[in-house]
């Protein structure tokens, strides 16, 4: 060893954190940064090129911190590498337009998908990768370890103890990654209290949190998972009846996740009516990894549901959940404790089935919500919408998909795509080539952004019928089976009627009549609740829908 | 607004009349009456222009049997998807079968 060499330094991150925290000594009162000083504080606490986690979740947004970060001087803070579960707000992208941030790693970008595409095209934004939720959290502990985490909660005390309320969502995963690798954790809260005794519960311990700032207004939260039963159409009811008979009942699906949409809302509302009549209560749909969908209330009230673990909260469901602690996961204070990281893991490893919708499906069953000019991202669907090869515990549904007698074959998770063959507005769902392929070429991505890969899809359900893809013996047969239910789309028009008849005989395809589903019964009168007001009635007045969902 | 006419080979005239669906946004009404012997005729009034090939494809799949009862079908469409069109026609036809047996 060369004795002239400087002794190696092992605590650069810790020293750097100490240096920055000392810079705001004069600004902060202990851990509390005054609301009006947040921009100045961020300019001291964040360095150029830092990896910054911004808590933009599916529902909860650290919007005071994101608006404040967009106001820092780009001369002082620039080239940030933003890591965000969800890019949902316009200021998230102002960061890039103003030159404060440069690179983006994210999961989901629903409402901002168009602008992300434009910024990318204009060279103002560079994308690391589009992730699934668990994948993004995982990278926070590997190669995307954050220098700063900006998060949101309802209340904090002066020691930094944080109460996130029902929308804990991503906060624990994001904070842990920063707090235990000398990152700086800054939390915005709606309310500051003096002491822990005034917090309903502690979701994040104060020793993990470096700074607290009271937001100028309560954090933004979006009721994303409320579907008004009035908008459920007879065709949704028909597809829901087919799902219950041809998938839930057939495979004895006891634990599941429902993607968002009117199709799955219709299934939830058919359990207490159609499902009850089929004698399925207690045999299917007992355990859920699900956001608190208001449309699940009638099934819960009718005794179908044993447990629901939630990714996030849902506005208006707070008091209902508080009154049903046997079903929902709640804190000692009685309010919901959601946790996206754990719920995603539950949806990946512990449920029998994922069922969801998508915008495009190709002839191989690959699906994507990325369409031309829109980089929508993935969110959590791919985590739940695949067969996790690390699973080992058997359940009746998982075993029901075995195709051979081999003692070495593994069971399979059910991954169901439930789509109408055409969408309103004249767009076919089944297409020759996913738009995602062209989007990848246009933006220089190494892979097309596929939501769920065809080889993970076990069933495709349309208004025409169900394709039992997992039973297909070859790739060619898979394509033909899928085409049989793809209607008059470019994919479906290739179907050969005589082949379809043979598939129906062999049980690879089922039409409504093969499942004992009467099309004439597919009316809205089968829905357990026909309006949001009906849901309120089912809940005994405990569900308190946001104003936009009230017609009264 | 577009008016379209289609015809398909069929057998003797059907018995009875039936109505399925409603002319609401994204939906359609299907009126079925007995047709002329040997031919099922479908008259479509649709709010969406330029989709004649799609109607042809949907109807072709339904009226495949040249021995089936001849119908006179009137469709009043307010932007229904092909899936909804297929479902409503099936509903009308299955009700007609029931009505015929009674």
Image: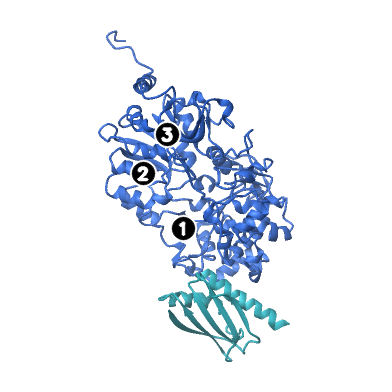
- Taking the spot 69% from the left edge, 57% from the top edge, the residue there is A272
Q: Nearer the viewer, residue A213 or A426?
A: A213
Which chain is painted in blue? A
Q: Is residue A448 visible?
A: no
Residue A54 image position (x, y, % from top left): 41, 37
Which circle's residue, 2 or 3, is located before the other in the chain?
A: 2
Q: In the drawing, does residue A250 fall left or right of residue B49?
A: right
**Callout 1: 10 Å neighbours few (<14), some, many (20+)?**
some
Give the image quarter of residue A311: top right
User: Disc 1 versus disc 3: distance between alpha carbons?
Assistant: 33 Å
Point out the frontmost of discs 2 and 1.
2
Q: Are marks 2 and 1 on the same chain?
A: yes
Under circle 2, the secondary element is helix
Q: Which mark is residue A359?
A: 1
Q: Which residue is under mark 3?
A: A150
Same-chain check, marks 1 and 3? yes
Determine the chain carrying the residue at label 1.
Answer: A
Q: Residue furthest left?
A: A75
Cβ atoms under marks 1 and 3 closer than 8 Å: no
Using the image, name the chain to which the residue with label 2 belongs. Answer: A
Q: Is residue A378 above or below residue B40?
A: above
Q: How many marks?
A: 3
Shade representing chain B: cyan
Q: Which mark is residue B11?
A: none
Q: Residue furthest top?
A: A3
Q: Which residue is mark 2?
A: A91
- Under tag 3, what secondary structure? strand
* Chain letter behind tag 3: A
Residue drawn at x 27%, y 9% is: A4
Q: Secondary structure at mark 1?
A: loop
Residue A465 coordinates in the image, percent (x, y): 58, 65
Expressed as whole percent of the image width and height from the top left, the position of residue A408 reads: 62, 42
């Amino acid at each position: 060893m060369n004795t002239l060499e400087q002794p190696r330094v092992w605590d650069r991150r810790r020293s750097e954190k100490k240096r920055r925290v000392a810079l705001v000594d004069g600004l902060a009162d202990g851990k509390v940064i005054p609301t009006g000083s947040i921009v100045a504080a961020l300019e001291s606490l964040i360095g150029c090129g830092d990896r910054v986690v911004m808590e933009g979740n599916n529902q909860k947004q650290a919007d005071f911190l994101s608006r404040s970060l967009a106001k820092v001087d780009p001369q002082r803070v620039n080239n940030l590498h933003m890591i965000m579960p969800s890019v949902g707000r316009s200021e998230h992208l102002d960061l890039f337009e103003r030159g404060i941030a440069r690179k983006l790693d994210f999961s989901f970008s629903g409402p901002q998908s168009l602008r992300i595409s434009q910024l990318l095209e204009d060279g103002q934004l560079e994308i690391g990768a589009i992730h699934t939720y668990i994948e993004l959290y995982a990278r926070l502990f590997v190669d995307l370890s954050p220098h700063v985490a900006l998060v949101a909660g309802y209340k904090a005390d002066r020691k930094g103890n944080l109460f996130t309320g029902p929308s804990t969502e991503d906060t624990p995963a994001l904070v842990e990654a920063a707090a235990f690798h000398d990152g700086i954790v800054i939390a915005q809260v709606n309310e500051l209290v003096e002491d822990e005794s005034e917090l309903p519960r502690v979701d994040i311990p104060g020793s993990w949190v470096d700074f607290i700032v009271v937001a100028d207004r309560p954090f933004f939260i979006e009721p994303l998972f409320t579907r008004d039963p009035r908008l459920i159409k007879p065709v949704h009811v028909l597809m829901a009846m087919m799902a219950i008979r041809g998938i839930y009942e057939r495979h004895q699906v006891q634990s599941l996740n429902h993607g968002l949409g009117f199709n799955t809302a219709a299934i939830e509302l058919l359990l207490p009516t159609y499902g009850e009549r089929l004698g399925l209560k207690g045999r299917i749909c007992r355990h859920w990894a699900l956001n608190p969908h208001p449309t699940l209330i009638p099934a819960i009230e009718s005794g179908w549901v044993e447990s629901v673990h939630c990714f996030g909260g849902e506005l208006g469901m707070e008091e209902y959940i508080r009154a049903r602690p046997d079903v929902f996961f709640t804190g000692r204070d009685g309010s919901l404790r959601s946790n996206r990281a754990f719920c995603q893991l539950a949806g990946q490893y512990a449920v029998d089935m994922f069922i969801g919708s998508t915008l495009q499906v190709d002839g191989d069953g690959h699906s994507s919500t990325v369409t031309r000019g829109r980089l929508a991202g993935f969110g959590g669907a791919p985590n739940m919408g695949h067969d996790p090869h690390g699973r080992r515990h058997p359940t009746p549904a998982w075993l029901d998909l075995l195709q051979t007698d081999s003692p070495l074959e593994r069971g399979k998770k059910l991954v169901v795509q439930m789509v109408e063959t055409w969408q309103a507005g004249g767009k076919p769902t089944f297409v020759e080539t996913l738009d995602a392929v062209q989007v990848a070429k246009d933006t220089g991505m190494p892979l097309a952004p596929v939501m769920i890969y065809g080889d993970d899809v076990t069933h495709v359900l349309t208004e025409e019928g169900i394709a039992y893809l997992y039973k297909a013996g070859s790739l060619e047969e898979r394509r033909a089976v899928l085409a049989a239910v793809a209607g008059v789309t470019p994919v479906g028009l290739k179907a050969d009627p005589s082949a379809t008849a043979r598939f129906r005989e062999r049980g690879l395809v089922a039409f409504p009549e093969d499942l004992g589903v009467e099309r004439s019964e597919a009316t809205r009168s089968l829905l357990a609740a026909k309006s949001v007001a009906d849901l309120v009635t089912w809940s005994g007045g405990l569900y308190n829908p946001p104003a936009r969902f009230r017609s009264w | 607004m577009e008016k379209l006419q289609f015809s398909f080979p069929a057998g003797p005239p059907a018995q009875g009349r039936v109505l399925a669906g409603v002319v609401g946004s994204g939906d359609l009404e299907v009126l079925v009456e007995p047709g002329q012997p040997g031919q099922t005729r479908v008259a479509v009034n649709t709010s969406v222009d330029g989709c004649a090939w799609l109607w042809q494809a949907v109807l072709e799949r339904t009226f495949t049997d040249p021995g089936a009862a001849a119908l006179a079908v009137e469709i009043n469409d307010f932007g229904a998807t092909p899936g909804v069109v297929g479902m409503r026609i099936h509903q009308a036809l299955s009700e007609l079968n029931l009505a015929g047996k009674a």
